[in-house]
Image: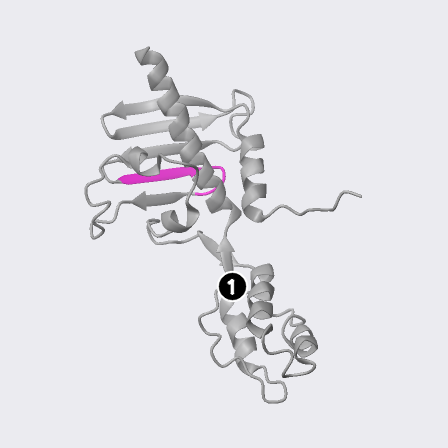
Amino acid sequence: PVPNIIASPEVEVARRFKRDTADHVMTVLHEEGLYRHLRFAAPQPDSWMHWFEIVTWPGHLAITGDMDSFSVKASADTFMHSRISDMFEFFRGNGINPTYWSQKVDGGAGVKAFSRDEFRSEVLDYIKDSVADWPGLREAVADEVFGDESIGCSRSAHAALYQFEHEGFRFDDASELDFERFTPQYLWCCHAIVWGIAQYDAARKAVAA
């Protein structure tokens, strides 16, 4: 039988983006050097579905639309990007780079969110070398930590680990564990930026031909 393989969130978002934008077309609302305003949407009457707009000005790019809004800027204190004015150049390359790009998101809001799957994975990885020395540890964690339905954010997750004790075992140095994942909205917008720039480049190339 064929195994039931569950796609990672990153892969699923990539598939979803492709479906969501299958009929999208680009409209240039404004273009004056590095000052651009592009809209991507399906034709009427479905233009409201999964639409997004990209706006650029020197050293900055903003994306807004049906999924979410983010603003990205080239850091003035980073040598590599202190000279980048055209943010399309910043995003051109081989696919998306969510981790690196998230460092450039203004404020960082909406980029990551608490994930119980990530919480479970990180905790199991933390205790994997200790289960042999503490019999029943895995079961205790499953019951007292994973079974706590009140855990809904990183703060409460770390608090639950801090309070946990099993026959002398404690999560003494788990404060640096990260239980958050990139949100589907942020990943979708990463794909939208790369795809949108590719559409823009293709249109300009066609005009120049």
Image height check: is 147 above or below 196?
Answer: below
Residue farthest to the right, as pictured: 1
Image-based side of 60 in relation to 22, left or right: left
The residue beneath circle 1 is: 179
How many residues crowd around disc 1 within 10 Å: few (fewer than 14), some, or many (20 or more)? Answer: many
What residue appears at the point 24 percent right and 30 percent down from the top-left corner?
34
What residue appears at the point 33 percent right and 49 percent down from the top-left corner?
104
Amino acid found under the numbered disc labelled 1: Phe
Task: Please check the rendered image and state whether residue 63 is part of the magenta-colored stretch, yes or no.
Answer: yes
Magenta region: 60-68
Residue 15's x, y, as percent? Answer: 58, 36
Residue farthest to the top, as pictured: 209
Question: Which is more toward the observer, 205 or 115?
Answer: 205
Q: Quadrant for residue 19, please give it.
A: top right
What residue appears at the point 20 percent right and 53 percent down from the top-left corner?
77
Image height check: is 80 above or below 44?
Answer: below
Q: Quadrant of the N terminus?
A: top right
